[in-house]
Amino acid sequence: MKLSILMPVYNEEERIADALKQALAVDYPCEIELVVVDDGSRDGTGEILGRVDDARLRVITHQRNAGKGAAIKTAVDSAEGEYMVILDADLEYDPQDIPRLLEPVLDGRARVVYGNRTFGSHSSYSFWYVMGNKGVTLAANVLYNSYIGDLETCFKLMPLELYRSLQVRSRGFGMEAEVTGKLLRRRIRPYEVPISYRARGREEGKKITWKDGVEAIWILARERARRRPAGPAAAH
């Protein structure tokens, strides 16, 4: 199996070198490629990406910032693996957890795996940030009669063709809610594994806001109101 690790990047010159180093240093149980989309960065991100020499790395550049969802779509269109997982470049997530996400897939227990963050005082910069995450996840569970633990997690691992079939349209952070809503609407319940997490604060460049939470709930409701696609749901 080949895994495509998709990394959207926007103005991360202080972290991108470490993010790439960490991602490429992991002992993966399968072949990987790292597809990085520089989403119109205006700082030194592009120059740093251009200096990295690794056959597993491919860099694609957006001339203008289009949003996380758009960057992921570009990466998905270019990816060559059987499976994919998203890894942000902000160092909040530890790529050493990716092999743990792969375990239930390689064991045949799951096809879709989410990394479930456990929030604590050392891993979140704000009470309201955590409550916003929990509120969006609660909305999904109520709307879809599910019991997922972390909708907004970056670590979403699934077959590349399954993601493509979802036809995600959200260009910004709303893609997280759209992906989950479309999976749940197909009655695909993600398998969840615990992961480590350290949220950065606004002064460190945190980009998501309360408006993204409101948009996520609207997207979940929109997807719930749509008719479920015809044909058998993909296996869990």
Image (cartoon, helix red, strand yellow):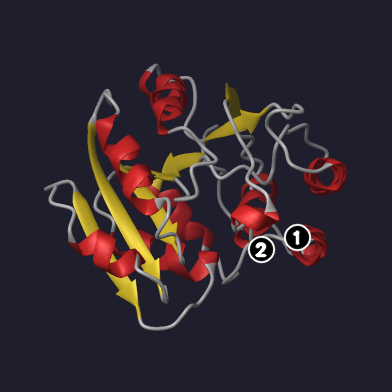
Left-right relation of 224 to 236: right
Out of 200 and 112, give the one closest to the viewer.
200
Instruction: Looking at this view, name the residue that lies furthest to the top.
Output: 107
Total residue callouts: 2
Left-right relation of 5 to 195: left
Q: Which residue matches tag 2? A: 174
The answer to whether the residue labelled 1 contacts the one labelled 2, judged by CB atoms less than 8 Å apart, is yes
What secondary structure is marked by label 1? helix
Out of 82 and 188, give the one closest to the viewer.
82
**Amino acid type, mark 1:** Ala
Label drawn at residue 76: none
- Crowding at dot 1, Cα within 10 Å, few <14 / some 14-19 / many 20+, comes out as many
What secondary structure is marked by label 2? loop
**Amino acid type, mark 2:** Gly
Q: Along the polypeptide, which appears first: circle 1 or circle 2? A: 2
Residue 205 sits in quarter: bottom right
Residue 99 sits in quarter: top left
Q: Does residue 194 appear anywhere in the picture?
A: yes
